[in-house]
């Protein structure tokens, strides 16, 4: 099944949490001179036109990134993400929103390497056109979960793997944990970030239990819910599971998640959590 197109949801609350996390991990990686490797298992098209028919259908960016751009005096990590968005939109009109490959591209140096996977037949060509330089980014029409096994460990010996499947197939919940175990076995010093939706509390908790059952250490959880998780259908929130996070990320998240929870809330049950699934 390949019906999911992220452009319908670009710039929403889940994107903000995901891309904040990606941005902060990249900031940490470039503090060292040594090159790093980035693997994106479900890269999408890389950047999104918010004027497109698909993005305009539900206009999820209106209650997400557009709302944040109107705010002032935000925590520094949030301002960093907004700077990337502003760079893509030099006028006052919000026309484009970056996907995770474009966020990473903002930070990478000539010595760093990207490996971007996208299986959707309509999205892959757009991603490949956005990253034509194969020395910088290897764009493949491939199963991203399989790439975790195939591409690790990287020759750079430092790396970051982002896994954010659409979960339109229920088995994605199993595949993402299996891929984490495979990757960690080959590359235990790497940083891994798994995005997941909060469609209901039980389903999200089952995934967190599965990650804990791997016995992988040093796993941080960031979660943001903008409304009650049980009363309405649809995505009430999302979370990021980070293995080997930057040592500053827990503190940063405790500053930016309360702000996001307040600014993006849809009811008075909006909430967030910053906790360790398994400590170091």
Image (tube, grey):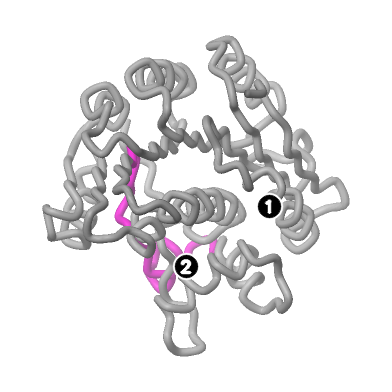
- Which residue is situated farthest in the front direction here? 33
41 magenta-colored = yes
Seen at 67% across and 22% down, the residue is 205
Seen at 25% across and 40% down, the residue is 117
| Count of numbered circles in the view | 2
Q: Nearer the viewer, residue 154 or 85?
A: 154
* Residue 224 at x, y percent in the picture: 69, 45
Q: Vertical placement of 251 versus 256: above or below?
A: above
Q: Which residues are magenta?
A: 40-59
Q: Secondary structure at mark 2?
A: helix
Seen at 24% across and 43% down, the residue is 115
Seen at 32% across and 26% down, the residue is 145
- Disc on res. 56: 2
Horizontal placement of 110 versus 80: left or right? left
Q: Vertical placement of 56 versus 8: above or below?
A: below
Q: Vertical placement of 75 versus 223: above or below?
A: below
Horizontal placement of 114 versus 173: left or right? left
211 magenta-colored = no
**Mark 2 surroundings: few (<14), some (14-19) or many (≥20) residues within 10 A:** some
CB within 8 Å, label 1 to label 2: no
- Disc on res. 162: none
> For mark 1, what is the residue?
252
**Mark 1 surroundings: few (<14), some (14-19) or many (≥20) residues within 10 A:** some
């Amino acid at each position: 099944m390949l019906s999911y197109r992220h452009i319908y949801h670009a710039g929403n609350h889940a994107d903000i949490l995901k891309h904040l996390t990606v941005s902060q991990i990249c900031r940490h990686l470039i503090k060292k001179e040594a090159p790093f490797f980035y693997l994106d298992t479900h890269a999408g098209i890389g950047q999104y036109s918010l004027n497109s028919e698909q993005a305009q259908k539900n206009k999820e960016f209106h209650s997400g990134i557009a709302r944040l751009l109107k705010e002032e005096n935000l925590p520094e990590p949030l301002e960093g993400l907004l700077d990337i968005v502003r760079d893509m939109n030099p006028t006052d009109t919000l026309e484009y929103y970056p996907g995770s490959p474009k966020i990473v591209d903002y930070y990478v140096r000539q010595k760093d390497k990207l490996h971007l996977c996208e299986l959707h037949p309509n999205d892959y060509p757009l991603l490949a056109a956005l990253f034509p330089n194969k020395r910088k980014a290897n764009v493949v029409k491939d199963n991203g979960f399989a790439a975790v096994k195939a591409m690790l460990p990287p020759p750079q010996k430092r790396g970051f793997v982002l896994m954010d499947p659409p979960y339109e197939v229920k088995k994605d919940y199993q595949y993402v944990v299996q891929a984490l175990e495979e990757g960690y076995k080959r590359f235990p010093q790497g940083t891994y970030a798994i995005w997941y939706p909060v469609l209901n509390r039980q389903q999200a908790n089952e995934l967190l239990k599965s990650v804990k059952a791997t016995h992988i250490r040093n796993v941080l959880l960031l979660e943001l819910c903008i409304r009650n998780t049980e009363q309405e259908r649809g995505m009430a929130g999302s979370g990021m599971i980070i293995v080997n996070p930057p040592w500053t990320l827990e503190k940063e998240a405790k500053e930016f998640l309360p702000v996001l929870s307040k600014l993006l809330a849809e009811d008075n049950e909006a909430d967030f959590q910053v906790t360790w699934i398994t400590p170091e």
